[in-house]
Amino acid sequence: MADTPNPIQIQKFLGGVDYPATKDTLVSHAKDSGADGNVLDALQKIADKEYDSPAAVSSAVSDA
């Protein structure tokens, strides 16, 4: 999907997150960091679980 943000865009808005982090924590942190709609949509589509690293989040976004 062309609108899916790349991992660098996503991680830009997740800087400072303490891992492991839940999906809700990631979405909330991204919102607070000023993430755009594409990034928020991508994060809202990932599985509702704990993520142990930025790489795990990037992988989940690319698989969503």
Image: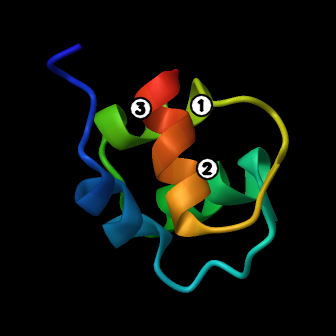
Q: Quadrant of the N terminus?
A: top left
**Helix, strand or loop status at disc 3:** helix
**Helix, strand or loop status at disc 1:** helix
Give the alpha-carbon distance from disc 1 to disc 3, as whole Å: 13 Å
Crowdedness near tag 3: few (<14), some (14–19) or many (≥20) residues, C-alpha within 10 Å: some
Q: Which mark is residue 62?
A: 3
Asked which quadrant contains residue 40, the reply is: top left
Identified by mark 2, the residue type is Val
Q: Report the front residue among 39 and 19.
A: 19
Give the alpha-carbon distance from disc 2 to disc 1, as whole Å: 7 Å
* Residue at 32% across, 53% down: 7
- What residue would you read off at disc 1? 44
Q: Earlier in the sequence, mark 1 or mark 3?
A: 1
Q: Is residue 33 above or below residue 37?
A: below
Name the colour scheme: rainbow
- What residue would you read off at disc 2? 27
* Residue at 51% across, 60% down: 55
Identified by mark 1, the residue type is Gln
Q: Is residue 45 above or below residue 40?
A: above
* Residue at 52% across, 21% down: 64
- Would residue 35 be found to the left or right of residue 4 on screen? right
Identified by mark 3, the residue type is Ser
Are discs 2 and 1 less than 8 Å apart at CB?
yes
Q: Earlier in the sequence, mark 3 or mark 2?
A: 2
